[in-house]
Image (cartoon, coloured by chain):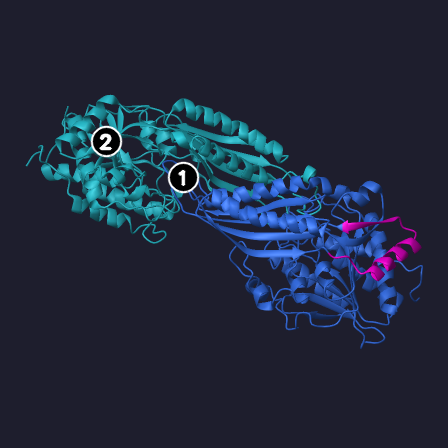
Chain colours: A blue, B cyan
Amino acid sequence: MGFSFSSRINVERFWHTIERSSEIGRGREGGLSRLALSDEDKEIRDVFVAWCREAGLTVTIDQVGNIFGRREGQDNSLPPVLMGSHLDTQANGGRFDGIVGVLGPLEVIRSLNDLDHVTRRPIEIVNWTNEEGARFSPPMTASGCFAGTYPLDWVHQRMGDDGTTFGVELRRIGYLGEAAVGGRELDAYFELHIEQGPVLDAEKVQVGVVTHAYSSHGFLVEFNGETAHAGPCAMERRRNALIAAARLLVAVDDLGWEYAATGGKGTGARLAAWPNRAGILSDWAQAVCDVRHNDPGAAAVMAERVRRAVGEAAARAGCTAEILDRWDWGGMIFDLGMVAEIRRQASALGYTQRDLPSQAGHDAYFLARVCPTAMIFTPCRDGITHNNNELATPEDLEPGLNVLLHSVVARADR
Amino acid sequence: MGFSFSSRINVERFWHTIERSSEIGRGREGGLSRLALSDEDKEIRDVFVAWCREAGLTVTIDQVGNIFGRREGQDNSLPPVLMGSHLDTQANGGRFDGIVGVLGPLEVIRSLNDLDHVTRRPIEIVNWTNEEGARFSPPMTASGCFAGTYPLDWVHQRMGDDGTTFGVELRRIGYLGEAAVGGRELDAYFELHIEQGPVLDAEKVQVGVVTHAYSSHGFLVEFNGETAHAGPCAMERRRNALIAAARLLVAVDDLGWEYAATGGKGTGARLAAWPNRAGILSDWAQAVCDVRHNDPGAAAVMAERVRRAVGEAAARAGCTAEILDRWDWGGMIFDLGMVAEIRRQASALGYTQRDLPSQAGHDAYFLARVCPTAMIFTPCRDGITHNNNELATPEDLEPGLNVLLHSVVARADR
């Protein structure tokens, strides 16, 4: 017994936890629809908490519903090494996005238990609330709150599509904890995640070493106009908020195409309008869009172009516009020492590896603001994600899990 | 007693019925939200049927829920003169659109009762189901069915935003009648309506003689794509149905502006998408749009351009598109004899009048396919309609009502 170079996680046990998770909040064939703070989210949280306790972890829930499971070390006066991700999914989500980064760490803990290895520093695992932002804007709300970017009250007031708020739903499902959000020292944060892009799968590379993150700028925009008849109302008199929002989303899509050659993205993600019915012009519309680029300077230019497009779309449609919310993340380079450690472990374990940036949003971006942080990517089939056909096999995930195990122990034992 | 040149409707009594109607399905301040086949629609129908019976009319309900109230004439072997419009409203509707054309005829009947005047031909009044199309596409569903344009089963299968169908909702509110829809001879059809445009109000003209109707072409379009992550998914791989729909609505709006100088209109009225959330591309979207022009040839060109824009929007967004439904109306000239009669009566009664076209959709367009048809417009403030601020005063409405009374009697007594 004891931890050694030959120690490995138990991929079969890990896979069983993935299969159990895949039963909760089933969506379309093969996928999940487990929106943050829904009944389904409560169910997976309950299961996760039970698993944590079975593994001997001390469970703490904070005031934004983040669930921490702590394994004591030899010196508990030292800040813990943290690993985690999220258990919530998109409305048409897969079984792996986020989930691998919570249940993988659980498997790391179970493996350390099997080995009877007590690390020098304590180790914690975490499930962050509402990473997806599919129900409440912005995404990564609760890790952002943990990092001190979003105030607690503001997070509780976030309103979902259905008119409910983050705080009310958090209390409803029983996960409004008492622990303060953040404000404590962490030794390091590791996040394991499927790539959500096609590179590792296409190149048959086993481990992705995430060096840095794309800069992303998101916008929640509201347009106000006036209802009128779709027939007699002259074009010059129209104040159709639906058209203002549609013009903004098209402008953002055009912007994405303009920057496509350098890997830029522009996304129209959401459009809601009222009354939004045949025969009448809408007097209210809401749009959610974002731009992303590997180069923070280019991303900033794109964001400024979006800001201008908001005004142009509103003016063209005779409406007023207000940017209700903006979120900006990424653009950082992960901790060089941790990235080097991941490379070293992947190499020592004999896995093929490559460096790559992360293009999606991840809780790790906020954690990078408060402690040394790094991410490990695993392959996923054809890069398909936010889709019920998202797929990663045990073979795809095992290398990343073992790199996580060894990197975390190296960090926690130093 | 008896009907004479000096006979007039009772505007106070008429206004009381308008005020009672204005209490049912209240929407925003001063407006109504009385969607077809809703509980509120049932309530106004019940009140209307009671009023018809109190006025001595025989009430018949057909298989699409149209409510007819019949007043026998001296020779009941002759086809009846029909007047009517609709009691349903938009989600942000006013108190007059359609309603004046149902409760006005009720007042005509009550006035004839007061006068003890029995016309030679029978007279009927009607409330057509789902004129607005705000809940079920297309608009004027039930008058279209009456005219033989839409098959009965097809009408019953129309699905609303909430997943319910026309037929199920019709039965639920108790207005699935037994009478055959249409297929009977009518002597003539009169429809009284607020102008829904600013002309009469701006020119201080009391009576609008509607000579013809704008050609309108409506489209219900569905786009299908694929969900994917708003971050890593390359622009070239995206199949965002929300963007396809937004591009179509912008193209239709652009088309409206292109034809604005000649009074053309292009309207994006509805956009729905799924999942329609931050962080994910939508794989399904639906758009409702229409184009209208005074010149049927120009309208046909606009419609063809919309059809092409559907394909272009889909191709640009990597999606497939299907036009699920199309509706075409208007483009006709109203019956010259009836139009002349309306002009004559307005003149005899000493009202100011002017000819003008109708730009909105009206049940009269379908009735024109089966019998001589004409419309009378009344002023409404600043042309505001499909809006809670829609306003017409008793003074605005009285001239049109008296022209209706005299025109109908002239027609029914001939």
Residue A135 point in image, percent of width and height: 59, 55
Residue drawn at point x = 58 percent, y = 30 percent? B312
Residue B79 seen in the figure? no
Out of A375 and A324, give the one closest to the viewer: A324
Out of A167 and A313, give the one closest to the viewer: A313
Numbered label attached to residue A398 = none
Residue A259 seen in the figure? yes
Height in image: B260 above or below A346?
above
Q: How many residues crowd around disc 1 within 10 Å: few (fewer than 14), some, or many (20 or more)?
A: few
Q: How many residues crowd around disc 2 within 10 Å: few (fewer than 14), some, or many (20 or more)?
A: some
First to last magenta residue range? A332-357
Q: Secondary structure at mark 2?
A: strand
Residue A176 found in image quarter: bottom right
Residue drawn at point x = 45 percent, y = 34 percent? B257
Q: CA distance from mark 2 to mark 1?
A: 24 Å
Query: Which image quarter is the N terminus of chain B in?
Result: top left
Residue ID for mark 2? B354
Residue A15 point in image, percent of width and height: 79, 53
Residue A124 found in image quarter: bottom right
Residue A92 point in image, percent of width and height: 64, 47
Height in image: A244 above or below B128?
below
Numbered label attached to residue A236 = 1
Q: Residue A345: say if magenta.
A: yes
Height in image: A72 above or below A85?
below
Q: Amino acid at mark 2?
A: Arg
Q: Residue A290: say if magenta.
A: no
- From the viewer's perspective, tell me whether residue A22 is left or right of residue A77: left
